Amino acid sequence: MKKIFALFAALTLAASAFAVEVGKPAPDFTGTDINGKTVHLSDYKGKIVVIEPYNSDCPYCMNHYRTGAMQELQKDMTAKGVVWLIVDSVNKKNFSYRTPEQARKEFVSQKITAAAWIDDNSGAIGHLYGMETTPQMFVIAADGTLAYDGAIDDRPEPFGDPRTAKNYVRAAVGELIAGKPVTISATKPYGCAVKYAD
């Protein structure tokens, strides 16, 4: 029994060692976008970065895009010099997986504004950041620390207009640009479970 407890404790410590933590440096990663380009988080050093875990088949994500709320947020943020990265961690065996060709078409049809759509079908980036749901959101400050981790807003509904909600990403980015500490730096994410292979 002691051995089992010790093993459990070791696994817990190991998992926590790899979990991202608000206020600590956001772990660097390398991925390939849907155009075949290699993307490193460190490429955007000195800039505010928003990471959006993506699955357009998820009703929550679908609603944000169907209403235009997500595209509006992307445009507003990128107009302020923020780097927006989409991370798609859906595994290749899941029906929601998009091939690079499908993703490129969807990028256009959804009118997405992002620096890159990263194909993370291995789940490496998703696991590194502890991405649980789509759309769980991450905001990284210009100094490279994680400033926000959690829900996109305070309206966990797959219908209606998300623009009526308090948007945590917009608020966090606004405070960072103003040189203020982020008031709400972590919330419980909502949405659909990320479709990892394991």
Image: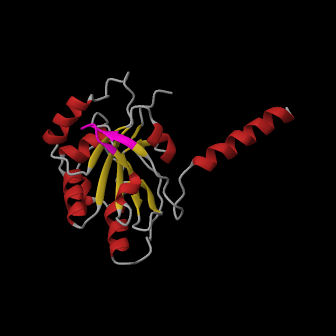
Q: Nearer the viewer, residue 145 or 196?
A: 145
In the image, what residue occupies the spot 46% across and 52% down?
28
Q: Nearer the viewer, residue 48 or 45?
A: 45
Residue 6 locus on image (x, y percent): 80, 39
Q: Nearer the viewer, residue 63 or 15?
A: 15
User: Residue 173 appears in which quarter of the rendering?
Assistant: bottom left
Instruction: Judge left or right: residue 30 versus residue 61.
Output: right
Q: Nearer the viewer, residue 68 or 10?
A: 10
Residue 132 locus on image (x, y percent): 46, 42
Highlighted range, magenta: 31-38
Say if the magenta span includes residue 34.
yes
Residue 12 locus on image (x, y percent): 68, 43
Say if the magenta span includes residue 98.
no
User: Residue 107 appears in which quarter of the rendering?
Assistant: top left
**In the displayed image of the protein, which residue is found farthest to the bottom?**
179
In the image, what residue occupies the spot 38% across and 62% down?
45
Colouring chosen for the image of the structure: secondary structure
The quadrant of the rendering that contains the N terminus is top right
